[in-house]
Image (tube, rainbow, N blue to C red):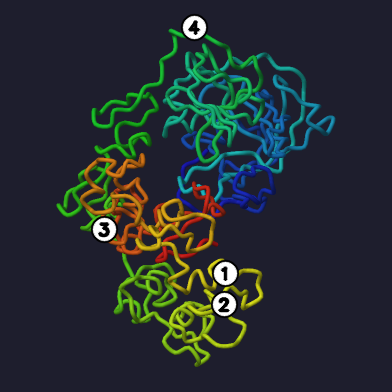
Amino acid sequence: MRRIALIPFTMMLVGIFAVTGCRNDDDDNPGNNNNINGTDDHTIYQIQDDTDPGHLQAGDQVRIERVVVTAVDKYDSGDGRTGNVWVQEPAGGAFSGVMVFAPSILPGGDLESINVGDLVDVSGEIDEFALTEDTSGRTTTEIANGTVTVLGVADPLEPEVVSVQELITDPSAEQWESVLVRVLNIRATDKNDSYKEVTYTGGLVGDDELWDLFGATTVDTCYGQVTGVMNYFFKYFLMPRSDADIVEGVSTDCATASDEICDDGIDNNGNTFIDCDDWDCQNDPACIETECDDEIDNDDDGDTDCDDSDCLGTVACPAPTENNDTDCADGEDNDGDNLVDCEDPSCNSHPDVTVCTETDCDDNFDNDLDGHTDCDDFDCLAAGACDSSAAVEAGAVECADGSDNDDNGHTDCADNSCRYSVAACQEDTLAACTDGEDNDKDGHTDCEDFSCQYAGVCGEETSDASCSNGLDDDDDGHTDCDDFSCQKGEDNRICEGNAFTCSDGLDNDGDGHTDCAAFACRCCPDEGDACTFEFVVSTCPRCQ
């Protein structure tokens, strides 16, 4: 593996997690004095160690004789990938292993012809492989377009015993890439079902690339030894090959996982990251820029005040907005959401914006640029400008006559064209939510109706004062900004969740999400958001 500047690597795979695919064989390196001349026998050390006097580079043709097979990928872990072979110098040590990418196997021609412990010759072309999505600058060194010739059975190789820190942290980790290693006395602390990975104390990750490690591992079990071949793909990880590679140990010999204390200068959880460099500390007060206008990097992350993402949405560093008559009529995308002026919901649906209303309802022009023209626009329907004898279910008369005027199967307030255009069909005001009627004909009355709860007119927890006192004032089981009545109250300016607070450029409730990025403003299950039903504040873009 090399750590190099980001340049186009040999050839990008199809799919971010695919490892098999075509390798480029056109990057020969004739200027390298160590390039193979057709008869020389090279070593893996020359391939992997860039300080070796005979170091070989990407594009060089190589032939390595009498090395030992340490792993063969015959196991389909669910991604359809098999066929890679790992080999190692008999002397072992750092820089002694390399992966041979999907080689031809001689004799026999298939994976069943080769096994761990075989003595082999290898020929092929050196490749430094990485996906462009990996911005670390690391690559995986491998032999591509290669052939592995089985000679017989080698003397058994002993794994190199290495510490977790050496295996997962640069610069020491690079030397163990593709080497057979063993780690002693580590506890399995977590299992990731999405990637079939196991995490051990200290942060080492084990992967089921070669064998069902995931299924064979029990969380919180102490393993006296875990053996496998190291690999790199977006991170360093260990690949055990069979059940013989994981051996349970004595529980007292393994450290237990502990929480990281984020301001004591100690790696408390043993994952090699200290304090704010540890992902566990990302939301700890000690690792958040809390003073955003003092010209000091308070959390020591290299970013000061408004250059620090922690400050985005604060009073000192508000996000850009587009929520007033000036900004909504200047022809600019002021808030950077790719919507300009009245095309933007923060303009056409903001209570304080007056320039985004369809005022001319018979000019065949979408005056407010909201995507609806003339009588197709609710502005015209609500104003009564489109009431006629035509088959329209809109306006105070048609929405209260007991007839399905537009023949769409819905009558009066049960028809969306009435529900969204006639005040009498809306259940989102104090009067409508306390009259004992199901005004919007959705089967729910007054404060049992989500539209009343969503409007923030139910309960006594609506004011800025009651929504910031730490009390559940209306005894509904929700306190302050966790309460719909606080989020949706039109007069509330503390909690993210209404037309004003979802377009003001501020992270009002301090949850790290500003305006339409907050679930209280916009939540779309079909887009993968963590909500069971769709809801979007009027000043946010509709769900896709």
Viewed as shown, does residue 195 lie left or right of 381?
Answer: right
Q: Position of residue 390 (x, y in %)?
A: 60, 86
Question: Which residue is label 2 attached to?
Answer: 393
The residue carrying mark 1 is 415
Q: Which amino acid type is marked by label 3?
A: Arg
The residues bearing labels 2 and 3 have C-alpha atoms spaced at a distance of 36 Å
Q: Are marks 1 and 4 in contact (CB under 8 Å)?
A: no
What's the residue at 44%, 75% (across, down)?
343
Q: CA distance from mark 3 to mark 1?
A: 33 Å
SS at mark 4?
A: loop
User: Mark 2 or 4 closer to N-term?
Assistant: 4
* Amino acid at the residue labelled 1: Asp
Q: Which residue position is annotated with label 3?
A: 493
Q: Are there few (<14), some (14-19), or many (20+) residues within 10 Å of tag 3?
A: many
- Of the image marks 4 and 3, the number of the one nearer the N terminus: 4
Q: Amino acid at mark 4?
A: Val
Query: In this picture, is 118 found above or below 462?
Result: above
Residue pointed to by mark 4? 250
What SS does tag 1 mark? Answer: loop
Mark 4 or 3, which is nearer the eye? 3
**Local crowd at mark 1 within 10 Å, few (<14), some, or many (≥20)?**
many
Q: Which label lies toward us, 1 or 4? A: 1
Q: Position of residue 20 (x, y in %)?
A: 68, 43
| Secondary structure state at the residue bearing disc 3 | loop
Which amino acid lies under the numbered mark 2 shown in the image of this protein?
Glu
- Which mark is nearer the camera, 3 or 1? 1
